[in-house]
Image (tube, coloured by chain):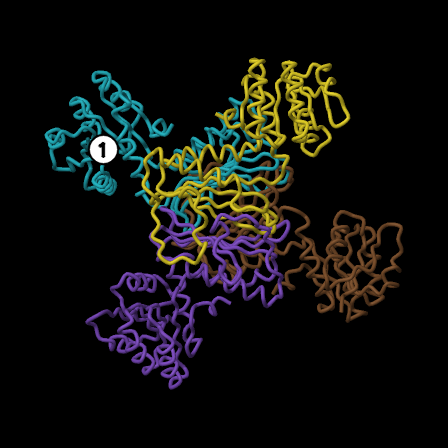
Chain colours: A brown, B purple, C yellow, D cyan
Amino acid sequence: MTLRVGVLGARGRMGLEVCKAVDAAPDLELVAMIDQGDVLFSASDNHAEVLVDFTTPDVVMDNLRWAIERGISAVVGTTGFTDDRLAQVRAWLAEKPEVGVLIAPNFGIAAVLMMQFAAKAARYFESAEIIEQHHPRKLDAPSGTATRTAQLIAAAREEAGLAPMPDATKEEVDGARGASINGVRVHAVRAAGLLAHQEVIFGTDGELLTIRHDSLDRVSFMPGVLLAVRNVQKHPGLTIGIDSLLD
Amino acid sequence: MTLRVGVLGARGRMGLEVCKAVDAAPDLELVAMIDQGDVLFSASDNHAEVLVDFTTPDVVMDNLRWAIERGISAVVGTTGFTDDRLAQVRAWLAEKPEVGVLIAPNFGIAAVLMMQFAAKAARYFESAEIIEQHHPRKLDAPSGTATRTAQLIAAAREEAGLAPMPDATKEEVDGARGASINGVRVHAVRAAGLLAHQEVIFGTDGELLTIRHDSLDRVSFMPGVLLAVRNVQKHPGLTIGIDSLLD
Amino acid sequence: MTLRVGVLGARGRMGLEVCKAVDAAPDLELVAMIDQGDVLFSASDNHAEVLVDFTTPDVVMDNLRWAIERGISAVVGTTGFTDDRLAQVRAWLAEKPEVGVLIAPNFGIAAVLMMQFAAKAARYFESAEIIEQHHPRKLDAPSGTATRTAQLIAAAREEAGLAPMPDATKEEVDGARGASINGVRVHAVRAAGLLAHQEVIFGTDGELLTIRHDSLDRVSFMPGVLLAVRNVQKHPGLTIGIDSLLD
Amino acid sequence: MTLRVGVLGARGRMGLEVCKAVDAAPDLELVAMIDQGDVLFSASDNHAEVLVDFTTPDVVMDNLRWAIERGISAVVGTTGFTDDRLAQVRAWLAEKPEVGVLIAPNFGIAAVLMMQFAAKAARYFESAEIIEQHHPRKLDAPSGTATRTAQLIAAAREEAGLAPMPDATKEEVDGARGASINGVRVHAVRAAGLLAHQEVIFGTDGELLTIRHDSLDRVSFMPGVLLAVRNVQKHPGLTIGIDSLLD
């Protein structure tokens, strides 16, 4: 039995990749490719069981209401979900308790695993630091992923009752020790040739554990999208992020 | 309330480190340091609740019987535990269901976490390879840790029903692609200056996840020993390895 | 004063990149873009001083004879240069001693520097090993660059009279220690998500020097092409590779 | 023919290592081990040709005057050489033009090669950043080696007329982008388990070159000391650092 999948935003950069990936997966069937100008009904007419939405903030809410009303689950990569919007989606879902909607800002499995592993390892090491490395066109430093990782580490350390990290630095050229995010030092490298990378270093006297993530191409999101497509019906209600699918 | 700890093999290289580590931990109290020529009774006289044994294969079984009979739990780093010996320990423990004995070939937390993370990540990536790097005095290649990691990865891939890893190699200089351990390629680097390192690389088109472990000094085993000391009483019966303490 | 440059194979993948790079360089002027169906004379008519040839083996020799006869220097990335062909080019150049032709199999500056640094470092360390990492569609293992690097290291070690590298391996799972290229161990990793990477590790008791190269995109060849364009006239005669431009 | 070597400070930590290293080298002969309370004349009586000085700032000048007067060359690892002291040594050497004295703050060959390679590579890449990693007991950040490397890179970039590095950072958590040393960003990681490490990353669109140095043990200085011992006589006058011996 294959799972019947429709793609909204099918002619966009990400949507196109999703169509290709669904098409190539033996357990999935691509039954509708919908974009601006197409009607949503082609999805229901073709008995889509799951919709993937990589559209735009101005149409995604209409798409979701339409899908939920018809009992179709959805995997959403479109951005712009405020707390209000999430509350609205939850309200719609309350009427249809068997439907699942998964909204994720990032479908990269490796990044999510890196954060999960970092959160788990944090309690066992005296020290933890993060080095993230990106292309020089990036506007913010550190990256959102690095900030989130630092927060997870800080929370795990606090829960485990760890002492502050050892650091005897007395003389510092401004900025050398990086940014402090909840007490975790984060260093942001920007250089031509880099894409998107992050290294989390954990240390105790005599040993180190390093978890590194390299993201080289947006095609890397497809395994995460497919994982969500295959599992969204088993998670009724609203799910944020693919983390809970990776346990 | 501190936990009262006795150390057997207290004058050996590892035992000495354990004594120091126990002594430095505010929640533990070092109540007995015992080595060849000393009597075990100093441990019971001083009300030790947990014994740590870094002795030798010829005395460890007597030590364990003595401890179990007296209801004292034990953390054991001594080697030489055959299946017969483990069965004997289990038989003794059957008589004292409240006593816990934890026997571990390796107390390095980072190495154990590396293996746990590798086992978890394995199902999500098309490819996985291992590079282990050691000093040139090492006799075997690959290392036991690398072999064990490869087995864990292979098992996780099989359970997830993954296809064989992609590899178009047609022309290979003998050995270039490493050793195959259950289908997982393992590369063993040996060079002066190296200590003990391992890198596990997971990849899918467009992204990589790398988990690296560096072991630089045997002092690194102490956090794992203390973790075992603090938890052994909560795990009655026989426990092999510190893995289950890290969940 | 700008240098006037013509590009042959201007509509090919590499030629197009060269055109863009020449166009963007303030000290270079793109005066001719020539491809199949165009006439070479547009290059001489526009007073090109240097030609860049990324065409095909069946036309490159005609292009070179034409350029040399007219006193135009050339930078060539086209493949297929046998010893016979090189001898022919040298013969043509003997008639025009002021003309320079540079033929390079690879214009990546980082790869060439990696090899130069490896060759220089080799004499100072007890051990040297190479790990190359590529996408799984690669047919040969190890890569040509890794093989060449190993040969350079072996030659430098021999010249310095170094003893064989230390390696106590007694028990080896077949292939674990990699391929031996002139006594230098080379390990070839193949995994989805990898592009083209190489790490050269040098070690002596207590310290390591590692040189790593990551090639992520063919656009990386442009700085090397431009370096050659700017310098080819200063190197009359035939030059193979960009190595000698990097001293 | 072996070279006859005397060691001053022979019972110190470094001196002892030097004695062992000289003794183990087939082309060197250890003819004098001198420390506090011993007389320098045992070196001349035993016809030492080169002295190695790992003593203290309060005696090293007397040692050097004595050696230079007798025509004995010297390799010096003792610290505390002010400009005045160096001028004094030069004045003594002016009287004995055949004698060589080499004073080095650091005999690690890998660190020196890392700096040489970085200086050479700097001109060919758009971007360069440095990550240095040390144990948390270090007082200064960044390390002296990182600062020196950054200065070398900045100087090479300026000489080559490179444009400033690309960096679009608009929003920065204070310190995230590291310290700027002459325009080169330097990041200092401090974590338990680390020893002394440095990574220099060079990048251009599409490729990266990374040079990494790991210093794990002071024994790593011995190859540099022996290199100096073997070559100091060929470099009459005063030489600072082992750099010029590595060309």
Res C196 visible: yes
Image quarter of residue B22: bottom left
| Up-down relation of residue D147 to residue B57 (above or below) | above
| Up-down relation of residue B51 to residue C11 (above or below) | below
Count the numbered circles shown. Answer: 1
| Up-down relation of residue C39 to residue D105 (above or below) | above
Percent coordinates x, y for residue C12 in the rendering: 71, 32
- In front of the other: B4 or C52: C52
Q: Tell me if mark 1 has few (under 14), some (14-19) or many (20+) residues whose alpha carbon lies within 10 angstroms of its own.
A: many
Mark 1 belongs to which subunit?
D
Percent coordinates x, y for residue B147 in the rendering: 46, 61
In the figure, is residue B222 to the left or right of A178?
left
Percent coordinates x, y for residue B67 in the rendering: 31, 78
Q: Amino acid at mark 1?
A: Val
Res D59 visible: no
- Quadrant containing the N terminus of chain B is bottom left
- In front of the other: A140 or B134: B134
Percent coordinates x, y for residue A75 in the rendering: 74, 59
Is label 1 in a helix, a strand or a loop? strand
Q: Which residue is mark 1?
A: D52
| Up-down relation of residue B10 to residue C167 (above or below) | below
Residue for point 83% across, 55% down: A33
Image quarter of residue B156: bottom right
Image quarter of residue A109: bottom right
